[in-house]
Amino acid sequence: MEIILSLIGGFLIGYLTSYFKEKGKNKAIIEDTSQITEEKEKVTSKYGLETTRRKIQYETKSNAYMKYFTLLDEQSQVGNLEAQQEFLPVLTKFNTDYLCNVGDTEKELKAASEFSNSIQAIMMKSQERYFKFKNETNSLKLIAGDSVLTLLDEMDRLSQLSFDVSAQMMKDLAKQIIEKDMTSMNEQKNLIENLAAQTLEIKEKLVTEIRRELSEI
């Protein structure tokens, strides 16, 4: 009887020892699996957040760059439209009023004064549009990469110079017409055309660099 009890006891002890060992293994496996799952979720979350961050950065930059180019094109388009609809009629009126009254000092001065006032009004509108463009450029510089930033600075310099030369040209025009100073008129015209060519070249470089920057996000 004692032998039987001893055998049963030994069997139970062996079973329980084996049971608890297996239970310990299973618990360890469960804990390892849980830890692996947790790490996987962390990695997935990390890359998910990284993807979201990159998406937001891409959209923010691309929208800002699109707005910049829209304003840049607007500068040119509206400028050309104003030249046709506002500046040319003012210039035609000045030519008519002045040429028809050559020798009449009072009427000559009146024609020159009216021309000057009209030019100032046109320049004020151009200045407001230019400041809007410049402010947008300054905002864009906060998020632009180094290469794009360098090109934006160059575009800013050319835009400012083009605006200044155009403004001076319109201010000088009445005097140049009266004095028939074609040399000065052609010099200013050539300078503006040269600045326009430089601006177009920088714009093309800017487009290329922006595409590269966006592709690397």
Image (spheres, rainbow, N blue to C red):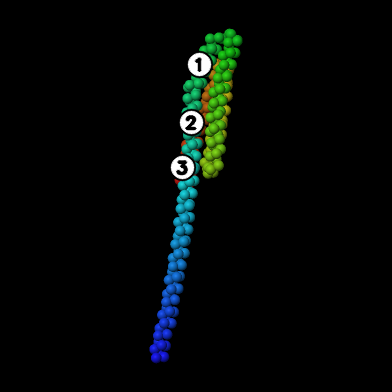
Number of residue marks: 3
Are there few (<14), some (14-19), or many (20+) residues within 10 Å of tag 2?
A: some
Which disc is residue 211 wearing? 3
**Rendered view: 206 above or below 102:** below
Rounded to the nearest angstrom, the CA distance separating label 1 from label 2 is 26 Å
Q: Is residue 103 left or right of residue 70?
A: right
Q: Is residue 125 visible?
A: yes
Rounded to the nearest angstrom, the CA distance separating label 1 from label 3 is 45 Å
Earlier sequence position, callout 3 versus callout 2: 2
Q: Which residue is mark 1?
A: 92
Q: In the rendering, at what x and y percent does residue 90 appear? A: 52, 18
Q: Which residue is mark 2?
A: 74
Q: Which residue type does callout 2 highlight?
A: Glu
Q: Nearer the viewer, residue 107 or 164?
A: 107
Earlier sequence position, callout 1 versus callout 3: 1
Rounded to the nearest angstrom, the CA distance separating label 3 from label 2 is 21 Å
Q: Is residue 164 left or right of residue 27?
A: right
Quadrant placement of the N terminus: bottom left
> Residue 128's quadrant in the figure?
top right
Q: Nearer the viewer, residue 1 or 114?
A: 1
Q: Which residue type does callout 3 highlight?
A: Arg
**Rendered view: 205 above or below 161:** below
Q: Which residue type does callout 1 highlight?
A: Thr
